[in-house]
Amino acid sequence: MSQTAVANTHRATLGSLTVLPLLHPQGCRGYLVADPASRQALAIDIHLDLVEDAAAAVQQNGWKLPYVVDTHTHADHPSGSAALAARMSSTRIAHQKANHRGVSRHPADGDVLHLGDQVVTVRHAPGHTPDHLVLLIDGAVFAGDTLLIGGMARTDFLGGDAGQLFDSLQRVLGSLPDTTVLYPGHDYQGRVRSTLGQERQQNPWLLLGDRATFVRQLRANPPPRPANMDDLLRLNREGQDIPNSISAAEAMRLVAAGGQGSVIDVRTGAEFDGEHIAGSRLLPLDQLAQSADQVRATPAPRLLLCRTGSRATMARDTLQRLHIGGLTVIEGGIEAYKAAGGQVERGQGVISLERQVRIAAGLIVLAGVLLANVVHPGFVWLSGFVGAGLVFAGITDWCGMGLLIARAPWNRRSNRASSGIASACAASAPSACAASAPAPAACAASGCAAPVPTTDAAPACALPKRPQSS
């Protein structure tokens, strides 16, 4: 099922507007908001992997796309705003502080956009990042990472500020009624929307007593820094494409910095068992099409690895045809990685796929020569066929014999599950852009954290309860 098909199951009507969420296995949430009367639409926080899906949805519905918005600078995934805007001839929108190359419109707090007669109010909501925008549209708030369902955005990088986030929640969202629909920028449990009323009652961050408590809790125990963040910022801010390939030495640097979860090993299961980079995940080349969502769930840039680089290049081409971006081949494969000093985990030794191909080709050529001399001269064509196949493989870097041998039972065994992140988009703990949950009241006895006050006991709340709209 395509990402657009998944999004269609959550298609909603918002007053007279249509909302089409675009869900990504990494937990990212993007949106198309359209006015059916004018057929104008707005794109919000579209992931690079979903640019084709977004463009297809716009075209299939007969919409025009005048605006493409990044609510903030994304540090955990590649933004598709530049690619989508170029594809649809749209105006890119982001806050001035984002410093995004190619953005031509920088709204100030309170500025409005128009979808036909419909008004979209843009609010500046610094906190998660200094450049964060929130969009208010006809009874809904597209909050980006300012407020998550049951959670709160982290503020420990890119100039984030916990105190500013508390203030933004009060100033921008505090006066909105409980019935306001919340569309977040991320969710790691498969959810798409909530309401401010539900969040005021259930979100532990909104039940914290005052600004000082909120700031102290949000600054405590920050999650790990997003893997490969520097590469993502070069794309999202400066417009520099993620490289098609990198050296083994550069791959070592990324792995050492915590990027091992982005390494996708496309060799066979037996080769993976023989040796692999600790923390990498196994997705064999011949199974990539069926494993596309597992690739999407892997943090970009996705580092593709094989033995010497050829199969990784084939994997990149296969995944690009599936409209998956952020793909980088590790040049020279695991052999170059080891030669550069990279550490690998070793298991039982196996014969590499390349050696298996050479052995099989040699046996077939030998058999053809013997049969031609003993049985019938026509068998010499068997040797000739293999020779032609090897020439073709050398010219095109595509080896049909290798793909067939990779499917052999002895190449499919794997003694362990591949490492890396889970294949599902849901996670038991918040991911790259979410803060850890505030400490429970039970911790107060040990002095490790302040208790979470109840709603009645709270002298103030991060998002005060408001009456229902009439």
Image (cartoon, helix red, strand yellow):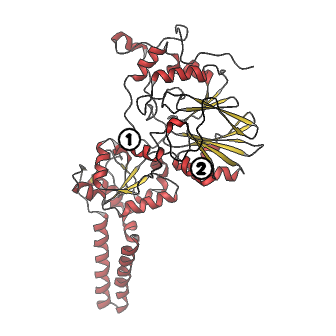
Q: Image check: 98 left or right of 337?
A: right
Amino acid residing under circle 2: Ala
Look at the image and tell me in which quarter the C terminus lies.
Answer: top right
124 w.r.t. 321: above or below = above
Where is residue 424? Give x, y as percent. Answer: 48, 41
Q: Earlier in the sequence, mark 1 or mark 2?
A: 2
Q: Image check: 118 left or right of 132?
A: right
Q: Which circle, 1 or 2, is nearer the viewer?
A: 2
Q: Image check: 204 left or right of 19?
A: left
Q: Residue at x 58, y 53 (%)?
A: 86
Q: Nearer the viewer, residue 125 or 401?
A: 125
Where is residue 323? Give x, y as percent. Answer: 52, 55
Q: Residue at x 45, y 52 (%)?
A: 241
Q: Count the marks.
A: 2
Residue beneath label 2, please? 85
- Image mark for residue 227: 1
Q: Secondary structure at mark 2?
A: helix
